[in-house]
Amino acid sequence: MRTLNTKDPKAGQKGTHSDNRLSLIQDILAKLISFDTTSRLSNLAIIQWIEAQLAPLGAELIRIPNSTGDKANLWARLGPDVPGGIVLSGHTDVVPVDGQDWVTDPFMLTESDGLLYGRGTCDMKSFIALCLAFAPEIAKIDLKRPVHFAFSHDEEVGCQGAPAMIDEIVRRGAAPSAVWVGEPSEWQVISRHKGIVLTEVEVTGREAHSSLPDEGVSAIGEAVGLMAKVIEIAEGLKREAQPDSDFATPYPTLTIGEVGGGTASNILARQCRFLFDMRCPPGFDVDAVLAPFLAEAERVDASIKARAPEGGVSVTRLTHVPPLDADPGSAAETLLRALTGDNSMRAVGYTTEAGQFRAAGFPSVICGPGSIEQAHKPNEFLAVSELERGVAVFEGLVARLRSA
């Protein structure tokens, strides 16, 4: 087992060209992994470091901060300020390591038996490392159309960062011809993914002694009925699954991920809160799917208010990330299929920023190093062979840019 250094990467190391390039990518990845960019934390340190790598290349750097200023997207452009070109998109945040049983330090890149361990190796700092390693070569090309790097914050908590960056791209009239989102796909081209809607439900009742249930309203009791409605809808969607769907789970899913409320077993709970997410393939009307739940929430709200006017039900849509549908023949599909040789049509159940780019009118696909099966787990890893494959893919990109 070998821990890789986090010194600032430098080119020109001894060895073959291929060995030097792979070593440089691993050094960059080690530096990226060393930044704890768990979504609850700021990502400004990693953004600043990435800017320091791109600024000497003459890239135009545009930060798009969040509302509180503790996080930012980075949109960087190499080449002319004209429409068209390609966006290389990745997110800088990672999921928490809390409570996970890690054998290595999750924020120190460690190599063992051809595998690179660390939080974000797979999802998805390896793609960013490849972008940064090849940026100097791209910067030397007399580009006719720009190459953009779009590095976002808060993807792991509902793709919250990218919309502001996409809006800025639209506002500046810089619409690209293709968006390449480097989420882990083992370098297979992904043309379709599900969208996600995250919903928060807050139920307010009235506290009372548990021996006098008619004197109060149990928020938990009312919430249980609403959660049962979520499950009922989910089971109905499962029964109506489309057998010819290309999704592994061939129907929209609803799952309850968080529940909290109550203060003691002998007190009717005043508050209960739960969150559920819905993941829909392209072609489903989100509002229609959720309509039965919203109708039940209105009924329960009225029932609570009749007994406790200060109570009720509040339903808030926290996130709505659109699905990605296939766009055969688009510039994005054509480019990635040419670079990888993959001509199969694939769909995945996870959600990415590709759906948001596509909703803005930008042709988008997913293709990147690593397997989604390793993402979010303890001892997350990426095979070195995935980086080696990435070198070949990016070398192909550079060759195409030179000949354009």
Image (cartoon, grey):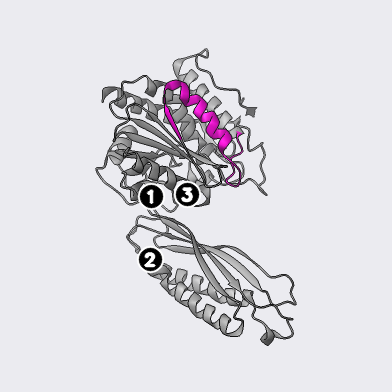
Instruction: Give the percent coordinates (x, y) of residue 349.
Output: 43, 54
Q: Is residue 343 above or below residue 197?
A: above
- Residue indicated by mark 2: 241
247 in magenta:
no
Q: Disc number at residue 355?
A: 1
Q: Which residues are magenta?
A: 35-62
First in sequence, mark 2 or 3: give its number: 3
Instruction: Give the percent coordinates (x, y) of residue 44.
Output: 56, 36
The residue at the point 43 percent across, 69 percent down is 290
Amino acid type, residue under disc 1 in the picture? Gly
Amino acid type, residue under disc 2 in the picture? Ala
- Residue indicated by mark 3: 159
Instruction: Give the percent coordinates (x, y) of residue 313.
Output: 55, 73
Label 2 Cα neighbours within 10 Å, binned few <14 / some 14-19 / many ≥20:
few
Q: Which quarter of the image is occupied by the N terminus?
A: top right
| Tag 3 and tag 1, C-beta contact below 8 Å | yes
The residue at the point 26 percent across, 46 percent down is 328
What SS does tag 1 mark?
A: helix
Out of 99 and 218, give the one closest to the viewer.
Answer: 218
The residue at the point 34 percent across, 58 percent down is 245
Compute the Cα span from label 2 to label 3. Answer: 27 Å
Compute the Cα span from label 3 to label 1. Answer: 10 Å
Out of 163 and 106, give the one closest to the viewer.
Answer: 163
Q: Is residue 326 above or below residue 105?
A: below
